[in-house]
Image (cartoon, grey):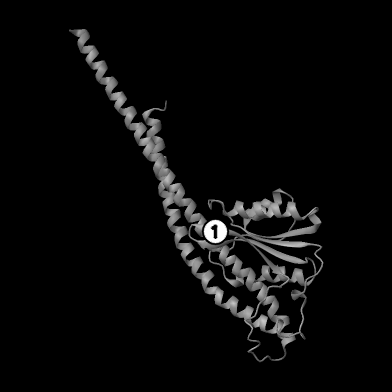
Amino acid sequence: MASLRDIKGRMDSTKKTKQITAAMEMVSASKMSKAEQNAKSYVPYSEKIQEVVASIAANNTDVSHPMLSKREVKKTGYLIVTADKGLVGAYNSSILRHLQRTIQEKHQSSDEYTVIAVGRKGYDFCQKRDIPVSKSMIGLADQPKFADIKELASETVQMFIDEEIDELIIFYNHYVSAISQQVTTKNLLPITDIETNGSGSQYEYEPDQQQILEVLLPQYAESLIFGALLDGKASEHAASMTAMRSATDNAEDLIGELELSYNRQRQAAITQEITEIIGGVAALE
């Protein structure tokens, strides 16, 4: 049985841990609020660029682009969005399990796929399991800007244009709410799911639609990548907040159990001392 001193020491250390996790929860909550706002504010831009691309690609049979055409899939690119650190619950593990399961089900050889890893956890996971990584980004800001990921997004899209990969699939955690994040798989390239509202083109183009498409399609694909990263960051901060709240609650429960054990042992010690005193007095009489 632990001594009173040992129990007191555990109580003190657990209280300090509780203070740390409570502070980390508040920090994550603040970051999550801003990240959620960033993700939502980006949606109108993403929808507008999709509308413009759709008005060209879907309503005009005279224009074409490699990014709009399916081809035989010889190699698949997987873009995974993870965190650089732990203490985020199942945020990282859910994505990485999904990646590993997909690879096992779809591929027979490592020559058939490659990974673009965003986040240290994803990169380390692939390195330890000899999963090929073509590109990686570590140390992405808590509130990323497009300039931060422009190079990676551009190079990833160029891999598809240059036929280094024949399809690009992204795995990330979609932000549903502060307590719910959903593992999401999205086929980014080739772009085959552009839909129009049926009203036809409402734009006049200069110089011409084909040249505009050449510029706009890579930008559209890059915007999809950036939107997924914003969504993933909101999910990361939400997962961290939830994990720290759970840790704080667990610390509170443990402190209560330790206090109860401490008081019981203290009462037992006092009772023992009183018994010994009474016994000593009785022996003197």
Please tell me whether mark 1 sits on a helix, a strand or a loop. Answer: strand
Apparent side of residue 139 relative to residue 71 in the rendered image (left or right): left
Residue lying farthest front?
198
Kindly identify the residue that appears in the image at 36 percent across and 29 percent down.
4
Kindly identify the residue that appears in the image at 60 percent across and 66 percent down.
228
**Res. 116 image quadrant:** bottom right
Would residue 239 be visible to someone looking at this image?
Answer: yes
Vertical comparison of 47 with 16: above or below = below
Vertical comparison of 182 with 58: above or below = above
Vertical comparison of 170 with 248: above or below = below
Q: Residues within 10 Å of mark 1 (few under 14, many from 20)?
A: many
Kindly identify the residue that appears in the image at 61 percent across and 53 percent down.
94
* Quarter that holds the N terminus: top left
**Res. 6 image quadrant:** top left
Number of numbered markers: 1
Question: Residue 276 in the image: x percent, y percent?
Answer: 26, 16
Question: Residue 2 in the image: x percent, y percent?
Answer: 41, 28
Apparent side of residue 254 relative to residue 212 in the rendered image (left or right): left
**Res. 10 image quadrant:** top left
Residue lying farthest left?
285
Kindly identify the residue that appears in the image at 39 percent across and 27 percent down.
3
- Residue type at tag 1: Gln
Question: Residue 253 in the image: x percent, y percent?
Answer: 40, 42
Question: Residue 56 in the image: x percent, y percent?
Answer: 69, 84
Residue identifier under label 1: 181
Would residue 149 be visible to someone looking at this image?
Answer: no
Vertical comparison of 174 with 161: above or below = above
* Quarter that holds the C terminus: top left
Task: Work out whether residue 77 or residue 274 is closer to the camera in this orientation and state it.
Answer: 77
